[in-house]
Every structure is written in C-alpha cells, then in structure tokens.
C-alpha cells in the first residue's frame, strides 16, 4: 500500500511537499534538469498525457501517435486521418486526437482545417522509438549508444547521457555475472547470445567513446573526462567476460552425461522436455495396466524355506571382555625453557645494580656470542620498565621489573665485535627512584 501524504489534495500538491521540511534538494543536477525541461518544453506533461489511464487506452494513444508521426505529409486533414484510421471507431479516435491537441503534440489550424506536428511531438518521438524496435531485448543499450554517438557528432553531448550508458553497462555486467554463477547450461547459452550482441554494439561504438575522451581532454572538461574514463573501465570489464563465458561453458560440457550408447545426452532430454507444452500428458496411460501378481506353488515355497534354513550363516561375534588394568608408564613433562641470553643479561644488570652503577654503555649488554644472540638481546631491551609485563611471574616479569631503562640515540658507529661491525649508540640508565635509593644507601 502506498502512503499518501495528503489524499484530499493529491492533484494540487506541489513537488516540494513530498520532501522533508517541504524543501527540494537544490544541489541535485538531475532535478534541476527536470525542472528546466518541464518549464521550457512541457515534455513531462506530454508523457503524462499519453501514459495516464488504463493500459488499453495508453496503448491506443501511443499507437495513434506513432502512426500520425509516420505519415509523410506535413499537413494532415481530418479526412486523411479518418481514412488512415478507418478501422478505428469515431469516438475513440476523437478522444485520442483531443488528448494529443491538449498535450500540444498536434496543432490544429482552423483556417485550413488541417493538423500539424509540433516540435514537442518530434522530441517525444525520439523517446518512444525503442517501443517499435524489432529487437526489444537490446533496445536499451542500442538507444543509449546511439544517443551518445549521435550527440557527440552533433556537439550536444551531455554528462547525463554518459552516466546512463555507464549504468546500463554495469547492469549488463551484473546480469551476465549472475548467469555465469548459476551454472545452468541453458541460462549460460541464452546469456552468451545476448552478451555477443552487446559486445558487438560496444565495439562498434568504441571509436566514438575514444573520441569523446580525447575531446574532453582537449576542452578541459574535467567532469566529462572523468565520466568517459569510467565508461571505458565499464567497457573493459564487459569485454573481459568473454573468457569467463568460455570457461563456464566448457565446465558445463564436461558435466554433460551421455545416456548409454544412444548418443543422447541429458542436454537433449532437457531441451525436449522444454519443448513439451503439457508435461502432465506424458503420464497419461502410465497406470492403465493393473498390477499382475506372481503366483508361486506351495512346494516351491517349501523348497525355498528349507534352503534358507540350511544355508550356512556366519557365526556372530562373541562378546569380548575389557582388557585388564595396566599401570601407566612414567613420563616427563617437558617445559620449554627460555634462551640463556635473558638470564645472562639479567645477571649483568643485577651486578651493575649491586655495584651502584647509574649509567652504562649499551654495547656490553648487547654484544657477544653471535649476530643472532645480539639481535635477541636487543629485542629484550624494550621489556625494561614495561608496565604491562611487570605483574607477570617468571623471567619475563623479572626482566620488566629491572630498574634500568634503555636510551637509544641517533648516532651510529663501529663497534669492537667479531660478528657485528656497526650499530646504533645508546646507554642504559637506572630509573630515578633507584638512583635516589642508591644515594640514600651511600649516605647511610
């Protein structure tokens, strides 16, 4: 059910009344174009006059309008119209002609008693031309490509035309992608046929699209150039789907099953079933034959029963007792130990603390052994003073509770080590609280 904001005055409602706070968005370019078109040419009023009402009446109006526009004479008398629409009753014809005159699609010249086609009708004819195309399936893409290419040649190209064409290419891409994901052979073949037609249309219009991009670059129209590039990307995405269709069809061919040695595949059976209009007719006569019971003599039943009783049967398995209790073997719980470099570094820091050292060079605490050991010691330095690790138990927590802090500098230089030739400078300093404790112990 559609909500009506003001049922009592729906015909008198303004366009702004359908928006929040009764204010239409002024920054929308499409809305501005609709307002300009409605105010200048009345095209929306003409469309409303043609398509308002029941479907049968709308069809009659469109048919009469298209027939009138196809008549070669520029001035058409009422007698010529009566002869052309001789199969149509007078009352419906008069109603349709009156509606066309009120919509400014036909102009009546009272002095000459003749009808004339208005410029608004010629403009409306371009919008309704897809209704009479032979291939309605590809009429949307054909009309959009025709409008873009023709507008480019006439110099009247608008950004809205490129946006509509790009949106249609995106919709076609999603439609073909759904067909590929479905895995249905018939769906794939129908979509592949339409894809080939769309691909040929896009390839024929590729020169015009390339010329549009070049012209936008030369004129410095940034918006038109951006839309042309996006249109090129949408075209490239559509072109790349050809290989996906081929792979999907090859997969469907591999899954085809041949029924025995007849050469008939499940695809043939499915195609034949689709050609049958009433599938339920295939079951006619299937149950016409009654069920014929098979009668067996008594001595045959006895022979079969005796053979069944005398037949050797495998002996059932006897129940086995559970195994006796066994003692579990002794084992050792292996606990991964930390590398000895952490304990060595903690021992070094503890000696410096007991000796009352306040600041030490970083090199003795890091270097020694090999490059891997030195790298591991350097990675342990950020643990010093880590508040989140100080509450942990074990070697990691002891390392975080050390009273030393590392201070790296931007200077670098050579070091006297067998495995490392160059490293950053830095020092290890005792925490401020630890320095005060050391001073108090010294004074005592």
Image (tube, rainbow, N blue to C red):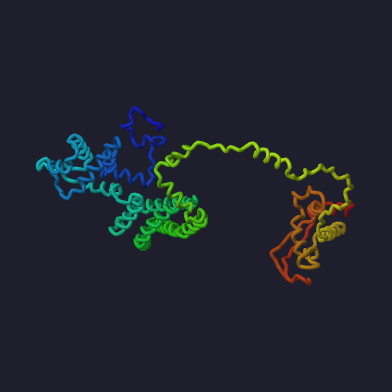
Residue 357 image-quadrant placement:
bottom right
**Residue sitting at 40 percent across and 51 percent down?**
167
Q: Nearer the viewer, residue 417 or 106?
A: 106
Asked if one can make out residue 219 in the rendered structure from this viewpoint, the answer is: no
User: How many labels sit on residues?
Assistant: 0
Indicate whether 351 appears above or below 37.
Answer: below
Residue 24: give x, y in percent of width and height: 38, 39
Indicate whether 347 appears above or below 22.
Answer: below
**Residue sitting at 37 percent across and 51 percent down?**
164
Residue 365 image-quadrant placement:
bottom right
Residue 280: give x, y in percent of width and height: 43, 39
Judge from the rendering whether residue 248 lies leftward or rightward of residue 43; answer left or right: right
Judge from the rendering whether residue 102 lies leftward or rightward of residue 142; answer left or right: left
Q: Nearer the viewer, residue 107 or 81?
A: 81
Residue 354: give x, y in percent of width and height: 87, 57
Residue 378: give x, y in percent of width and height: 75, 61
Judge from the rendering whether residue 363 lies leftward or rightward of residue 82; answer left or right: right
**Residue sitting at 75 percent across and 45 percent down?**
314
Asked if one can make out residue 385 in the rendered structure from this viewpoint, the answer is: yes
């Amino acid at each position: 059910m559609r909500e009506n904001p003001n049922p009592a005055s729906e015909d008198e409602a303004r366009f702004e009344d359908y928006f929040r706070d009764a204010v239409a968005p002024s920054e929308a370019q499409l809305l501005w174009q609709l307002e300009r078109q409605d105010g200048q040419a009345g095209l929306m009023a003409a469309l409303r006059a043609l398509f308002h009402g029941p479907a049968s009446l709308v069809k009659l109006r469109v048919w009469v309008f298209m027939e009138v526009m196809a008549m070669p004479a520029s001035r058409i008398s009422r007698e010529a119209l009566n002869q052309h629409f001789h199969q149509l009753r007078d009352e419906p014809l008069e109603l349709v002609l009156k509606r066309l005159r009120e919509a400014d699609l036909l102009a009546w010249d009272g002095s000459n008693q003749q009808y004339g086609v208005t410029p608004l009708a010629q403009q409306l004819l371009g919008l309704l031309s897809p209704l009479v195309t032979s291939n309605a399936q590809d009429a949307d893409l054909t009309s959009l490509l025709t409008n873009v290419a023709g507008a480019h040649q006439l110099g009247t190209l608008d950004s809205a035309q490129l946006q509509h064409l790009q949106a249609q290419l995106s919709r076609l891409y999603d439609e073909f992608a759904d067909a590929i994901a479905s895995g249905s052979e018939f769906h794939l073949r129908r979509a592949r046929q339409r894809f080939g037609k769309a691909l040929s249309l896009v390839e024929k219009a590729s020169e015009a699209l390339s010329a549009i991009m070049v012209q936008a670059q030369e004129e410095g129209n940034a918006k038109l150039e951006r839309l042309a590039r996006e249109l090129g990307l949408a075209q490239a995405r559509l072109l790349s789907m050809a290989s996906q269709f081929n792979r999907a069809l090859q997969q469907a061919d591999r899954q085809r099953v041949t029924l025995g040695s007849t050469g008939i595949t499940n695809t043939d059976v499915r195609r034949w079933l689709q050609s049958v209009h009433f599938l339920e007719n295939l079951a006619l006569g299937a149950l016409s034959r009654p069920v014929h019971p098979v009668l067996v003599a008594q001595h045959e039943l006895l022979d079969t029963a005796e053979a069944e009783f005398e037949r050797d049967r495998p002996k059932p398995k006897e129940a086995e007792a559970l195994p006796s209790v066994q003692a579990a073997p002794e084992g050792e719980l292996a606990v991964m130990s930390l590398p000895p470099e952490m304990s060595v570094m903690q021992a070094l820091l503890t000696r410096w603390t007991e000796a009352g050292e306040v600041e030490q060079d970083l090199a003795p605490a890091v270097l020694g052994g090999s490059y891997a050991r030195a790298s591991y010691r350097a990675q342990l330095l950020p643990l010093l003073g880590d508040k989140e690790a100080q509450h942990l138990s074990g070697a990691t927590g002891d390392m975080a509770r050390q009273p030393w802090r590392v201070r790296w500098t931007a200077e670098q230089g050579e070091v006297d080590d067998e495995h490392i030739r160059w490293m950053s400078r830095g020092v290890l300093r005792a925490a401020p609280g630890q320095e005060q404790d050391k001073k108090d112990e010294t004074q005592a």
